[in-house]
Image (cartoon, rainbow, N blue to C red):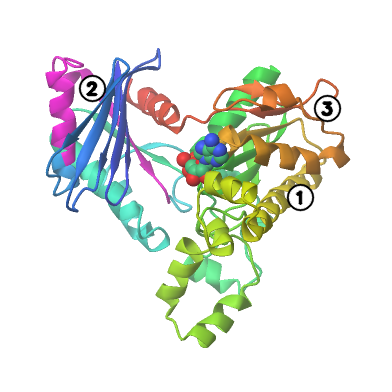
């Protein structure tokens, strides 16, 4: 059965077509700069990558191009072969704790939740509508980033602000990257050969979040009402004294919206270093002796350790720690620094295994009190698996 996995952003659309249940990727690609000038798309087929420059005024046109590529490259004989299309949606609020079929009622709720994810939810709806029009016979499903975190107990999702903010305005911790935390925690349980586990999953990429996962269920996670909570990220500040916001709004005379942009786009690695939001550039800056790059790297590692320590205590122990996403899978030095901070727990490093990028590997020593693994994440295959189950 062929299943399409789709991730629509405000100006982009990523896709992978799978043969299920084998989980074989038949074709993948990404459409970029949709609705902007100089739009283009790249597709990867049989190990070859092609880039094509075309006008992409909206997501529907991008979807039509996608379908044309599938037909012209004979990946499908007829569109009816695509039985399911799974869409990634960032914010599912408290409505959704699992993947669902995209009915009109579901789309209405995603729309209602746009206030909590103004950049992401409307884009996802555009993608769902485009797919419904272009491939009407496929089952359309919605996979929510927040769904995995719906098992958190209320003491972990209520903020210490007036309770009415929660009841009247939906202010609570929702978390994000749920599909990734679910994927790596399941894979870790497979490796350990058991499901009664206490895991700390570190999804550290441009965005970053850490979760405490007990017996396959989320107990706590570092992102909050929005993705700007918890860790220091590429350009997001993560946790800080909330009063800084109002204090600096007064000082700078900026609006709430402008402040939101500063905290999401001009803070984090970029804000402190003044160099870049990309950890590769920070590593280069450190090699060149740039003090602010050294400083932000120390802060970044410290914050990751804060959450590992917090969740270790909250779970009364830990059976494995997992690194994933761009930094977690690739930054040898960041992993080494985090592991160094975990020595106090009896964690040891296998330097040779740690000296690898982008592959599944145990990076802790055989004598380590807690096994530590790198597990490359695969959110697309999770979308395909759920969609396959709902399309069967
Ligand atoms: P993601 O958001 O998961 O795609 O992660 C993207 C981020 O991963 C980039 O912005 C970099 O900060 C980081 N990254 C990717 N490759 C490397 C690498 N080889 N070394 C250090 N950091 C990397």
Which image quarter: residue 52? top left
Residue placed under numbered mark 1 in the picture: 310
First reached walking from the N terminus: tag 2 or tag 3: 2
Check mark 1 vs ligand 1: CB closer than 8 Å? yes or no: no
Image location of residue 62, percent across then percent down: 18, 39
Q: Give the side of residue 60 with respect to residue 178, left or right.
A: left
Mark 2: few/some/many CA within 10 Å (<14, 14-19, 20+): many
Residue closest to the eye, 346 or 101: 346
Q: Nearer the viewer, mark 2 or mark 1?
A: 1
First reached walking from the N terminus: tag 3 or tag 1: 1
First reached walking from the N terminus: tag 2 or tag 1: 2
Residue placed under numbered mark 2 in the picture: 82
Q: Looking at the figure, which quarter contains the C terminus?
A: top left
Image location of residue 178, percent across then percent down: 52, 41
Residue placed under numbered mark 3 in the picture: 368
Residue closest to the eye, 64 or 328: 328
* Spatial separation of the CA atoms under disc 2 and disc 3: 47 Å
The residue positioned 54% from the left and 27% from the top of the image is: 358
Magenta residues (range): 62-91
Q: Looking at the figure, which quarter contains the N terminus?
A: top left
């Amino acid at each position: 059965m062929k299943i399409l996995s789709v991730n629509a952003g405000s100006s982009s659309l990523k896709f992978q077509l799978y043969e299920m249940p084998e989980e074989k990727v038949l074709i993948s690609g990404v459409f970029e700069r949709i609705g902007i000038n100089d739009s283009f798309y790249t597709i990867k087929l049989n190990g070859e990558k092609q880039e094509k420059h075309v006008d992409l005024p909206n997501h529907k046109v991008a979807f039509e191009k996608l379908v044309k590529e599938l037909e012209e490259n004979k990946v499908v004989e007829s569109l009816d072969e695509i039985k399911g299309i799974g869409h990634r949606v960032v914010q599912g609020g408290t409505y959704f704790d699992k993947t669902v079929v995209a009915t009109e009622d579901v789309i209405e709720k995603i729309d209602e939740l746009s206030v909590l994810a103004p950049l992401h939810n409307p884009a996802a709806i555009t993608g769902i509508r485009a797919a419904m029009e272009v491939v009407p016979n496929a089952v359309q499903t919605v996979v929510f980033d927040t769904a995995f975190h719906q098992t958190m107990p209320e003491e972990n999702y209520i903020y210490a602000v007036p309770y009415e903010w929660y009841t009247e305005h939906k202010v609570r911790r929702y978390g994000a990257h749920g599909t990734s935390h679910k994927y790596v925690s399941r894979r870790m349980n497979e490796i350990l050969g058991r499901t009664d586990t206490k895991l700390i999953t570190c999804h550290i990429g441009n965005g970053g979040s850490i979760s405490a996962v007990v017996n396959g269920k989320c107990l706590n996670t570092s992102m909050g009402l929005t993705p700007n909570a918890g860790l220091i990220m590429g350009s997001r500040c993560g946790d800080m004294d909330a009063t800084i916001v109002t204090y600096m709004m007064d000082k700078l005379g900026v609006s709430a919206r402008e402040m939101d942009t500063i905290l999401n786009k001009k803070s984090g690695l970029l804000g402190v270093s003044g160099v870049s939001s990309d950890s590769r550039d920070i590593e280069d800056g450190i090699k060149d002796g740039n003090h602010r790059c050294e400083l932000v790297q120390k802060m970044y590692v410290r914050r990751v350790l804060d959450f590992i320590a917090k969740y270790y205590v909250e779970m009364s122990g830990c059976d494995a720690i997992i690194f994933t996403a761009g930094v977690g899978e690739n930054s040898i030095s960041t992993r080494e620094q985090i592991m160094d901070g975990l020595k106090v727990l009896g964690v040891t490093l296998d330097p040779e295994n740690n000296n690898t990028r982008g592959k599944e590997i145990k990076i802790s020593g055989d004598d380590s009190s807690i096994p530590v693994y790198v597990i490359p994440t695969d959110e697309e295959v999770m979308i395909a698996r759920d969609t396959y189950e709902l399309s069967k």
